[in-house]
Image: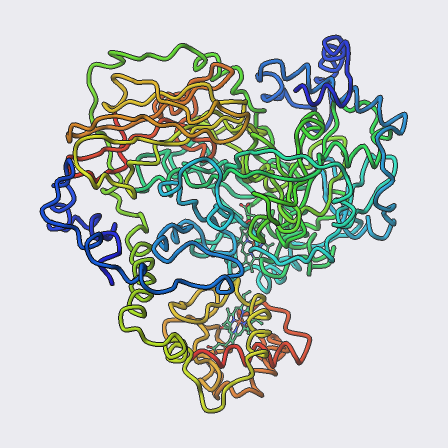
Amino acid sequence: MSDILKPSRRAFLRGSAAAAAGLTAAGAARASGPDPLITETQDWAIYFGEGVDATPYGLPIQYEADVVRRNVEWLTADTTSSINFTPIHALDGTITPQGCAFERHHSGAIELRKEDYRLMINGLVDTPLVFTYADLERFPRENHVYFCECAANTGMEWAGAQLNGAQFTHGMIHNMEYTGVSLRTLLTEAGLDAAGDLSDKWVYVEGADASSNGRSIPMDKALDDVLVAFKANGEALRKEHGYPVRLVVPGWEGNMWVKWLRRVEVMDGPVESREETSKYTDTLADGTSRKWTWVMDAKSVVTSPSPQSPITHGAGPLVITGLAWSGHGAITRVDVSKDGGKTWETARLAKPGEKMALTRFYLDTEWNGEDMLLQSRAMDETGYVQPTKAQLREVRGENSIYHNNCIQTWHVKPNGEAENVEVS
Amino acid sequence: MSKSLKLFGGTALGTLAVLTMSVNFADRNIASFPDNPAVMTAIAAPVVSSGLISAANASTSAGEGKLGLGRAALPEEIAAWDVDVSPDGTGLPVGSGSVEDGEMLFSENCAVCHGEFAEGVGNWPELAGGEGTLANEDPVKTVGSYWPYLSTAWDYVHRSMPYGQAQTLSTDEVYAIVAYILYSNFLVEDDFVLSNENFLEVEMPNADGFIVDDRAETEYPIWRTEPCMENCKDNVEITMRASVLNVTPEDEAAAEAEKVIEAANAVTETEAPVEEVVAAVEEPATDAPDPELVAAGEKVFGKCKACHQVGEDASNRVGPALNGIVGAEIGAVEGFKYSRVFDEMDGTWTEEELAAFLADPRGYARGTKMSFAGLKSEEDIAAVTAYLASFD
């Protein structure tokens, strides 16, 4: 039955001559003979499939087994303080399934039962409070779709093209529909009179895990759109995303989206925790570093074709697709270049851009079978245009690690393979 | 935006915005409220945000919008969780510790990963050195060369280290260890004693090395332009390729996935009953261990994972790989560099020996590199032993 499997992507990537020849030969469909998949009665048309009791909670079918999170072992000393990547090259639409949405932990994904969950609000509040999980479910709820991008996404690419695949260069991102209570509601419940003038106040948020991952957030953001979330894409958060409760900080770097949220403290100033001094600060060429670079600027990437998603059908109609997003608001336009940025065409947005959420774009085009240097360039509602890597380097140098939102280039070759490259 | 407005019914938001903005830059000891990029640059954001603040001030004073949910936090509870320390020393508990004590504590609790001199082992973070390298091609960022505040080091070590055993150090131990980290960075002398009283006197070399996010001034004006669509450059050349470095794990990962598919496929092809396949994988042993105990042991092994691996592909990390360790010779895992005491020990890891070691590693083998306090409960020891015994 192995013939029902798609040709192996790996075999293709290996550059196996036979595979490549077979794949690129495909043109307009002309059958060389009757297709046995049609003329012969197949097993699945004769026998039963699985019953409804076979899979109480379903996973993707086995044939999609390569659409999984992956990590890069050499990046970190240990997988308990590490990162893996969303397989964005193989997904479409905008919502990221929880099961393949990237994870980043600083001391592993803990298991914390709802019954054992407590959230404390303290500091400059009228009454320091403790909430149980059940308490949280009694506050008015909101639903919002937001992207969560690690500030280090594309961070390995500062000094040059390094990792060969959109999953690895741009996969520290996911986009989910969250259900939760606004942080404003909870702060109001504790009372903010004690804080006096709120304009210079902060909240410090921390998790229940061993890392605690504490971060300071200025009060105006805390009162604006920050969400204390307990559901994602309709179901409970996964443990790796902070079950039972995580913080959602729309448009701002993923490290601030504290998981296993256990405490919110209203404070006079920022704590300047390890995660906002040693890490998540961006060193410039002269050795000074920017801090409090919270917003994720506009960014986009072509997810297919890309190194892990080569063109397997030869010349002719081709769908170029990708994702765009901005922490400053909605994406208004995405342009695509096939020649490394000499000329650009405006792509079609699958839906009008939504604030601080992923936007899917398509360029429905005709491929002539020649080399392409594929790029995408996002624009957001503030008029910001995604910069090139050269533009970013000119301002920042090559050592800022975080916030690399440069235009990405894939070199698509005549055989359909694609490679991560840098162009002049 | 409209949602916020509805909630707080704000009027005259513009005026409020001006008022609150003007106090943003008050001279403060701790960094004052930032020249916030989100606020300053997002279209119309300052109005909304500051309006929210004023509205929140107004609405809470009237006790509006409260549902009476939750309960008051008790002082003991706040004390247990509110342990963060700010740059001005707020939150520091009373206590002290010397470089001398810190050296010993660091060696016992931290050196396996961070090195005896805090220089870092392998891929684990270095905590010392790197002075004057921040503008180099490869900056070395450590507590000494990079961290602007000493409070951060105290807070982080106290809250999150040692890795895998966070929150097990006493207040004085943290003072001593932080003193030692300062000493490793040549920032204090060897007779230095750090305490809550002299804490703010320590000068951090890179304290002035940070600026607040200035993208709104240095970048946004340049990049908020009408983009070029045609003849944007004369000529395009590939200047670098990922394949040159060849560091992408794609192949192994794809191979893994393929194996899964192939295995699944093999099952359907030969139409072998699923039970048979499972049985073959699980290998029923004659004295099969209690699966519940093994499962419990897997949980306990979470405490060991920071340093040990077990199972297929397990390799030596901070500690040796533990495949087949039950019944094996002590200190004999190939390729692992043991402490002297381990090198000199003879014998085998019977269940009894293991139990004694795991209950009190340092008591059992004085001078061991395994900086682990030990497992308190006998059930945990039995469980983790059963779990380890399930790998050979």
Residue at the location (72% across, 9% down)? B14
Q: At 37% from the left edge and 71% from the top edge, which residue is drawn?
A: B335
B63 sits to left or right of A383: right
Residue farthest to the bottom?
B286
Quarter of the rendering containing residue A414: top left
Q: Nearer the viewer, residue B114 or A137?
A: A137
Left-right relation of B176 to A92: right
Residue B71, position as x, y percentages in the image: 86, 46
The residue positioned farthest toward the right in the image shown: B62
| Residue in front for this viewpoint, A202 or A347 | A347
Q: Is B223 drawn above or below residue B165 in the view shown?
A: above
Give the position of the N terminus of chain B as an image quadrant: top right
Q: Is residue A113 above or below residue B43?
A: below
Q: Quadrant of residue A310?
A: top left
**Image location of residue A388, percent across then percent down:** 35, 23
Q: Is residue A383 above or below residue B156?
A: above
Q: Nearer the viewer, residue B217 or A326?
A: A326
Q: Position of residue A261 (x, y in %)?
A: 68, 46
Q: Quadrant of residue B267?
A: bottom left
In the rendered structure, the answer to whether residue A346 lies left or right of residue B317 reads left
The x, y position of residue A153, in whole percent, is 44, 37
